[in-house]
Image (cartoon, rainbow, N blue to C red):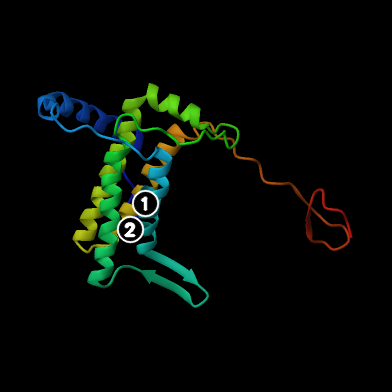
Amino acid sequence: MQKMCIPFAAMAMLIAGCTARNNHRHGDETSSAPPLLPVATIQELMDSEIDPAADFIWGSVGTVITAAGEEDRKPNTNEQWLELRRHAITLVEATNLLVMPGRRVANAPFPSAGPGVLSSEEIAAKVSSERASFDAYAMALRHVALSELKAIDDRDAAALSSAGEALDQACEACHVANWYPHEVIPALPDFKPNARSGTNQSIGLADR
């Protein structure tokens, strides 16, 4: 797969600057737009639109190893490409929903999932204080989603596979910045050989 040459954090900042200039330039055109009503939370958007769409795209192309051997998976029929395009459209448009002002992080507060992982209240505070950065990550996701849409319209499975790797990078970059910026990964458990059997046994397991 091809690697993205520009780090996603840098790409996000670049897109943020362009977005701000465009909004300023076209401010008069949007002043009379109808009011927006963000109902779903960021958590619900992830669960209902972004994750399902991304998972479908990821699973549509690539090499799958099964008991029968390797399977090269890619869309083959017009119906499969059309269904894939629906999910790409959902992913592209979901980025517009992410940047809508006034959208809450979650309906019910949730605690930190571990060291270095933010709670819902901490995420909300971070997004509020670093709004331009959050919006830029959403725009970086949009950039990748649009490249996937183009690959689908071109019926280019190889380009779609490369864009799938970029999609993973875009999602992870945003999650690291806004969800688990200082996550502590637990060390692997220590193993010692069992003297009687020679097999590895986890410390703490009683000999039988």
Q: How many marks?
A: 2
Q: Nearer the viewer, residue 73 or 33?
A: 33
Q: Position of residue 138 (x, y in %)?
A: 32, 38
In the rendering, at what x and y percent does residue 4 appear?
A: 32, 45
Q: Quadrant of residue 32?
A: top left
Instruction: Classify mark 1: helix, strand or loop.
Output: helix
At x 80% / y 49%, what residue is drawn? 203
- Judge by depth and name the residue closer to the eye, 149 or 163: 149
Q: Quadrant of residue 43 in the image?
A: top left
The tag on residue 73 is none
Q: Note whether 50 is above or below 104 in the view shown.
A: below
Q: Which residue is mark 2?
A: 161
Q: Residue at x 23, y 54 (%)?
A: 149
The C terminus - image quarter: bottom right
Q: Residues within 10 Å of mark 1 (few under 14, many from 20)?
A: some
Q: Amino acid at mark 1?
A: Glu
The residue depicted at 39 percent of the width and 38 percent of the height is 42
Please give left or right for residue 149 compared with residue 119 in the image: left
At which x and y percent is residue 160?
29, 58
Task: Check disc 2 and give the amino acid type.
Answer: Ser
Image check: 165 left or right of 14? right
Q: Is residue 75 left or right of residue 46?
A: left
Labels 2 and 1 touching (C-beta < 8 A): yes
Residue on which the image places disc 1? 165
User: Which residue is found at the position 25% from the left and 73% from the top?
Assistant: 77
Residue 3 visible in rendering = yes
Quadrant where the image shows the N terminus: bottom left
Q: Residue furthest bottom?
A: 68
Picture coordinates of residue 137, whole percent (x, y): 33, 36
User: Would you call the spot at circle 2 few (<14 residues within 10 Å), some (14-19), or many (20 or more)?
Assistant: many
